[in-house]
Each structure stands twice: as C-alpha cells, then as structure tokens.
Amino acid sequence: MPEGDTVWQAARRLHDALAGQVLIRSDLRVPRFATADLTGRTVLDVTPRGKHLLTRVEGGLTLHSHLRMDGSWRVYPHGQRWNGGPAHQIRAILGNADRTAVGYRLPVLELMRTTDEDRAVGHLGPDLLGPDWDPRLALANLLKDPARPLGEALLDQRNLAGIGNIFKSELCFLLGVTPWLPVGELPADRSAKLPVLARKLLESNRERPVRNTTGRRGQDLFVYGRARRPCLRCRTPVRLADQGDGSRERPTYWCPTCQPGPAPFTPRR
C-alpha cells in the first residue's frame, strides 16, 4: 500500500496538472457517481491527507480517492496514449486542455461536499506531512493502548497518518526495538524521539523517486525486503514474520541483534 510520501507525490503531480484549470472532461466510472459531471468547473487544489487524496473542485465539491494496494493516478499530456492498464480498470478521468489525469484500479472513489470531508478523513490522526502535524498528540494516541505492539500501533492511521509497512519496519529498526514490543514498554527517550524520527523519514523521502532511509547509495533500506540478508549494522541475518495491522497480516522485517525484544517464535521462512 502506498505510504504517506508516495501519496504526497501523487497529490503534487495531480495538483500541478489540474489546479487552476477548467475541466473539459469528467468521467467517474463507479455506479454511484456515474452520472456526476464536473466539466466546466475549476479544480481548486489536490491535497493529501495521510494516505487519502482530496481533489477539491469549484462549487464546494471534493473527489475523494484512496489507492490502497493497486490503485494509481497517472497524468498524461493532452493527446498522449494512456498506458496505466486496460480500459476496464479505469475508475476516473479528469481532463483539461493540457493534461488528463486517469485513475486506475481505485478501490475508493467518492464525490462529496467539501464541507463533508471529515466523513472520509476525520478519523485520521495527525498527518506526518500535513499542516495539522502534532507530535505530542501523535505520541499520546500511540500510548492510549500501552499493551498494543508498536508495529500495529504505527500502522493504525487513527494514531498518526502516513506510515505504512515499509516505514513501520524501518522506524522500529532505527528505534532499536522489535515491532512486537508493547508501546507502553518503549523507553522514555525513544518514545520522545519516535514522532520526530517518523516525520523526518517521510519528509526526507517525499521528494525522492526512490525511498531511502539509510543515507547510503545502493543500500536504500535497513531491514525491509532484506530477509536472510546481513543486517547493514551488525551482519546478523534479517528476519521476516507476519504482523497484523488490524485488518490483515503484513510482512515485517527486523534484526534480532539490533532490535532486542519480543518476536514471533517461528519467523516466516
């Protein structure tokens, strides 16, 4: 699932292509909104909120979308052939005289009044890349359930918005604890560092085409995707196991030497 930095990049591409321009093409290919027509309206802005995208249109309307695992928005110059997938996977088309934005495989697409945006994103915690970022509130949210494993708490967008499975694993590595450590057992100095470090990771990657948490060229991530390969710090083989996020199991990576603490008895092979 795209994480906060990736969604931020998607929002910027859409904003640059659409904001301030009048729509001359509008096609929402979901049954509930198939008859909605946004042509003739000016796109005001495209704003990311955690992992959600809010495209605000003249007349007090917002097109809310979420990419989840497979969705994407592609932007094409007027007249260029679209290549994001077969036509039956297209869920939305928004076009002006110069650019066309095409939404493929969007699992969430809904048109709402802008005043009702809270219905879609009001449950989210402070956005790591948003103007509402509040590190103290984010930490307080995480600590509300002290027995919950840290990895699960970080993926819960109600606590703080924008962290996905990659940043979860990398953040736990940088904090020196396993993702299965109960949040309440995180040492005080690391608790204080957590919100600052989380924001730094996303901020430093929102402008990058390739995500990097190590600062090293060619070795972009400390543990994510490195199962059975040597830890970049201590050379211990990185381990892999599944961890839930409240809805499904997620592949989770950690170094048993650099990240002491509770872990699954039987890691995934």
Image (spheres, grey):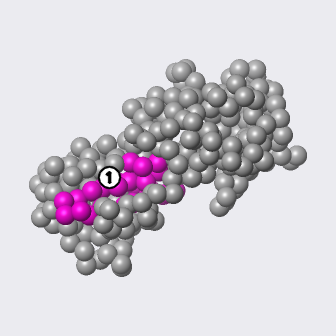
User: Is 61 contained in the magenta span?
Assistant: yes
- The span picked out in magenta is 48-74
Residue at image x 37%, y 68%? Answer: 110
The percent position of residue 237, horizontal first and vertical second, equals 77, 30
76 and 29: which is toward the camera: 29
- Mark 1, Cα crowd under 10 Å, few <14 / some 14-19 / many 20+, is some
65 and 160: which is toward the camera: 160
Q: Quadrant of residue 178?
A: top right
Q: Is residue 15 above or below residue 31?
A: above
Please identify the residue farthest to the right as the structure is shown. Answer: 265
The percent position of residue 144, horizontal first and vertical second, equals 68, 48
Q: Quadrant of residue 105?
A: bottom left
> What's the magenta bit mostly, secondary-structure-wise?
strand
Residue at image x 70%, y 54%? Answer: 244
User: Is 13 contained in the magenta span?
Assistant: no
Q: Is residue 15 visible?
A: yes
